Amino acid sequence: MPSSRTVLAAAAALATALCTPLLVAPAASAAPAKLADDFNGDGYRDLVMLGGTHGKDGRVTVVYGTSTGPGTRVQTIHQDSAGIPGAVEEGDQWGFAATTADLDRDGYADLVVASPGEAVGDVQMRGGLTVVWGGSKGLGSGTVFHSPIAPEYAGSGDSFGEDVVAGDFDGDGDQDLAAVSHSRAGVVLLEGPFTRTGGKAGWQRLGEDYGYLNASQLTAGRVTADAATDLYILGSDLGVGDGDMGAFFHRGGAGFARVAGRLPVPDDLGHQVGGGTITTVGDFDKDGYGDLAIGRGYEQPDAERGYVTVQYGGPSGPDTARKPVKFTQDTAGVPGGVENGDHFGSSVSAGDVNGDGYADLAIGASGEDLAGKRDAGMVTVLLGRAGGLSGTGAKAYDQDTSGVAGGIEHDDYFGWSVKLTDYTRDGRADLLVDTNDWLDNSRHGMIHLLKGSSAGTTGTGSKTFTVNTLKLSYTTLFGPFPH
């Protein structure tokens, strides 16, 4: 995962809200939250943005949802916020990764913030997960869950939390957390339910069936047809001869474990420098099984042109009898063309943009040159249909798209990260696009929200969230698995 960053706030009203910490309310519901990212239980999804600095370390910003999408109520959270454990220290990397879920089954979604650089006592890089609990007034106090893995080397931890995802992985009805651990465990599963005093139902190592699992990114979703959440681990097994990059599938349910071999993934030779998530799960052919898309926007030795591969799912997980499909900007129907430095696939996200029941795929190409401008960036949406994704009907979006704020400029990196989520609750996923833009002669991070419609993604009525990011390195969106 990349390190954190953010954007926000379309109006001056947001700046006022940024300074107002919100307190947690007592639990008011016995039923689990219906939405994994509805922190105040009002029925609308809330937007989470990672990054920015507070003092010497990071922060997380939340824009609370309304019937028309993210609104004007904004909350910034860091380790100086009331009720948040720990202290702001350089190198903690608080906000490096995040996910959301109702971890205590009180009817309010909770925010999980990773800090893989956190030192604990004299153990450096021990890491941790801060659960910021939801309530009727929004997010409030927090509880830290540290790695259950004892340090393998004196004074050095496992950087617990370089990526984290939520889901009901063991199929018992409670939300669990899977987090990257730089130990022989590779990935650690923390089993729910969780309590505000630090309790959890148990934990397990997911690297037991590997020689030495080296995980880099996690993707949760329903691949098989049962109710449990499945997990893909992107990484390598250093205990085998080649140690090549692969996608490893763990099927959810009782006895949650690895059940398939390595799906080969070309190694990008360390050139993954973008801001977005490069793996996502969606049912692109509506056969009842989740499909895995992997973006290779920085692939070498292809001069970083980039591509996306899709492995379709089946009753037991990845359908390895079905050949993976590769998409580039030379695929029939896909806008643009293959060029050096496009970074097509630098971020990916799945969601149903037109409400037809098929998952669609948003693909960032943050290095796309447009109108003579270097690295202006572009996002392409491929439509799902019977038989799966194709270039037919694909559309591209940039900052010259009608209704989208801003304009094409050098180094905007439009599509640095992308996310498809239904924020307006109309049954169609809205497209969030992260960019690195200029506003009022100063560098800003900017997130554009393009609405879903019966005709697909549209710039008409789009929203923009910005914040002066002179202290930011870049901005990151993340995509929790919706349930």
Image (cartoon, rainbow, N blue to C red):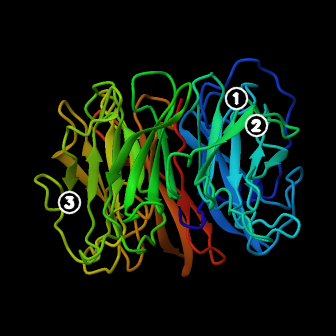
Instruction: Give the side of residue 360 with respect to residue 424, left or right.
Output: left
Residue at position x 41%, y 64% in the image: 243
The circle on residue 328 is: 3
The circle on residue 134 is: 2
Name which quarter of the figure residue 105 lies in.
top right
| Sequence-earlier tag: 2 or 3 | 2
| Residue closer to the observer: 149 or 424 | 149
Q: Name the residue under label 1.
A: 41
Res. 451 visible in picture: no
Residue at position x 38%, y 64% in the image: 241
Mark 2 is surrounded, within 10 Å at the Cα level, by few (under 14), some (14 to 19) or many (20 or more) other residues, namely: many
As shown in the figure, which amino acid type bears the numbered disc 2? Gly
Callout 3 secondary element: loop
As shown in the figure, which amino acid type bears the numbered disc 3? Thr
Q: How far apart are marks 1 and 2 (CA)?
A: 8 Å
Callout 2 secondary element: loop
**At which x and y percent is residue 83?**
89, 49
Query: Is mark 2 in CB contact (under 8 Å) with mark 3?
Result: no
As shown in the figure, which amino acid type bears the numbered disc 1? Gly
Residue at position x 89%, y 53% in the image: 82
Q: Nearer the viewer, mark 2 or mark 3?
A: 3
Q: Nearer the viewer, mark 1 or mark 2?
A: 2
Q: How far apart are marks 2 and 3 (CA)?
A: 41 Å
Instruction: Give the side of residue 272 with respect to residue 327, left or right.
Output: right
| Sequence-earlier tag: 1 or 2 | 1
Residue at position x 40%, y 23% in the image: 225
Q: In this view, does 267 lie above or below 263?
A: below
